Amino acid sequence: MTGRQSSLSFRLMALEFKLRDWLWPRRTIAEEAGIGPGMRVLDYGCGPGSYVVAVAEMVGESGRVYALDSHPLAIAGIRRLRQHKGLTNVETILSDCRTGLGEGEVDIVLLHDVLHDVRTPRPLMRELHRVLKPEGILSFSDRHMKEEEFIHLLTGDGLFRLLGRGRRTCSFSPLRPSTSDRIGGGRSAE
């Protein structure tokens, strides 16, 4: 789904993110998503873990953070971070699309600065829609994409609707078919 970076490219990106995260802490961005204690959060494209520690603290021991990335160095780094910080509520997932999570298992998906690298976004959108709870939130930001481009990509297939814009993120909610649509009905003839 995403093009795998070389190890050198990944390490350079991780260094750039450390500087970025020092200048603009990720916790303030994650707070826009409404993360709270006990929530289950999927950090899709977690990279070197910019959001992991803050989100793990925000969800607390009763919550869970799923850190997903397609690069083995990202997953190895998150595992080291988890051990170093004693983050017992963080799980890693090595994947480029499939999460392995159950349907409606996640309260919030963080999709930050990764969508521009996804070659085939539709399967990803379906997977994120599948794992989000009906009242869940997809928190989105991508400095590499224009707003009209990502809004069309996220809402165009009828999977998500724009809820609002924060200072640095946009929030989307999953759309679910109505009961009558699932039954095969719609309006009945009168």
Image (cartoon, rainbow, N blue to C red):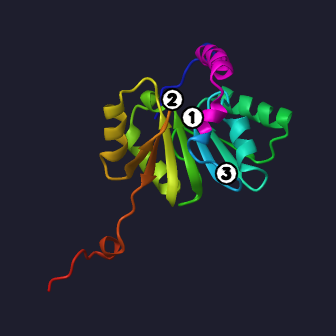
Q: Quadrant of the C terminus?
A: bottom left
Tell me which numbered mark, 2 or 3, is placed earlier along the sequence: 3
Q: Is residue 11 magenta?
A: yes
By secondary structure, the bulk of the magenta-drawn segment is best described as helix
Local crowd at mark 1 within 10 Å, few (<14), some, or many (≥20)?
A: many
Residue matched to label 1: 45
Residue lying at 75% horizontally and 43% vertically, measured from the top left: 57
Position of residue 93 in the picture relative to residue 130 (left or right): right
Residue lying at 35% horizontally and 65% vertically, measured from the top left: 177
Position of residue 67 in the picture relative to residue 186 (left or right): right
Q: Nearer the viewer, mark 3 or mark 1?
A: 3
Distance from label 2 to label 1 (Cα)?
Answer: 8 Å
User: Which mark, by number, is residue 36?
Assistant: 3
User: Which mark, by number, is residue 113?
Assistant: 2
Q: Is residue 187 magenta?
A: no
Q: Secondary structure at mark 3?
A: loop
> Residue lying furthest front in this view?
167
Please, is residue 84 above or below residue 180 in the view?
A: above
Q: Secondary structure at mark 1?
A: loop
Residues in magenta, as a range: 9-30
The amino acid on which the numbered mark 1 sits, given as a three-letter code, is Gly
CB atoms of marks 2 and 1 within 8 Å:
yes
Local crowd at mark 3 within 10 Å, few (<14), some, or many (≥20)?
A: some
Tell me which numbered mark, 2 or 1, is placed earlier along the sequence: 1
Choose between 116 and 63: the one closer to the eye.
63
Q: Secondary structure at mark 2?
A: loop
Residue 108: x and y in percent read 57, 49
Residue 71: x and y in percent read 61, 29
The amino acid on which the numbered mark 3 sits, given as a three-letter code, is Gly
CB atoms of marks 2 and 3 within 8 Å:
no
Choose between 3 and 116: the one closer to the eye.
116
Residue 150: x and y in percent read 37, 35
